[in-house]
Image: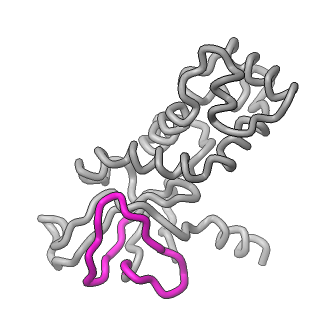
């Protein structure tokens, strides 16, 4: 029972539209309006069938279990390579938007991240964070927990934009270029059920 409850919590409730294909894919036998989405909770890439309503790229849509106003059904998960070129171009902006709108959640990542093993800290998975930045982050958060992305930037010298670091990490994980998954859920062989 606990496993089912835990699984339900992992499902996405809202997503950002990456691409809208009003007549589906060109090679599709049955033309249907398709939408490629990225979930706001675990950055899950999804393909869905849209209802007969106007849908815009970059729009936030409800995809949870209750009555949906724009999405008819979720077809399943996608890999990064399954995305259309248009969706790939929108991906970075969508991830940035998700992280920016959930600032508290992602700042807590900097406050609570721990070691992966005796040689590596999970913050080192973020592109651009080496031992010097890691030490600076750990020292600064020991003095006082970070309150915002701006606080991180102000208190850790020479650190790039923390949102950009997180965006780059999410894209790296979605492409499958990592053995550790810090921000996304790895694409499994099991179908996505919602």
Q: Look at 25% across and 53% down and name the residue there.
A: 84
Q: Along the line of sight, which residue is nearer the eye, 86 or 186?
A: 86
Q: Main secondary structure of the magenta part?
A: loop
Q: Is residue 33 left or right of residue 175?
A: left
> Visible in this render: residue 113?
no
Q: Residue furthest right?
A: 143
For residue 14, above or below residue 100:
below
Q: Which residues are magenta?
A: 47-71
Q: Look at 38% across and 73% down and name the residue there.
A: 75
Q: Is residue 175 magenta?
A: no
Q: Along the line of sight, which residue is nearer the eye, 152 or 139?
A: 152
Question: Which part of the image, by quadrant, shows the N terminus?
Answer: bottom right
Q: Quadrant of residue 139?
A: top right
Q: At which x and y percent is residue 28?
A: 16, 70
Q: At which x and y percent is residue 126?
A: 59, 29
Q: Is residue 69 magenta?
A: yes
Q: Residue furthest left?
A: 26
Q: Look at 27% across and 70% down and name the residue there.
A: 34
Q: Residue furthest bottom?
A: 67
For residue 141, above or below residue 11:
above
Tally of numbered discs:
0
């Amino acid at each position: 029972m606990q496993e089912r409850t835990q699984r339900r919590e992992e499902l996405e409730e809202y997503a950002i539209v990456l691409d809208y294909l009003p007549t589906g894919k060109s090679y599709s036998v049955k033309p249907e309006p398709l939408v490629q989405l990225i979930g706001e909770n675990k950055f899950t890439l999804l393909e869905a069938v849209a209802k007969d309503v106007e849908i815009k790229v970059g729009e936030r849509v409800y995809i949870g279990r209750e009555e949906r106003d724009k999405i008819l059904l979720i077809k399943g998960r996608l890999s990064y390579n399954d995305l259309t070129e248009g969706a790939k171009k929108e991906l970075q902006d969508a991830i940035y938007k998700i992280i920016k709108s959930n600032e508290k959640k992602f700042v807590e990542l900097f406050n609570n991240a721990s070691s992966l093993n005796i040689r590596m800290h999970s913050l080192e998975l973020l592109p651009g964070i080496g031992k010097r930045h890691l030490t600076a982050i750990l020292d600064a958060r020991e003095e006082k927990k970070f309150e915002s992305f701006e606080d991180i930037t102000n208190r850790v010298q020479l650190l790039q934009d923390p949102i950009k670091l997180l965006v780059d990490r999410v894209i790296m994980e979605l492409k499958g270029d990592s053995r550790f998954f810090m921000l996304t859920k790895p694409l499994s062989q099991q179908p996505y059920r919602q």
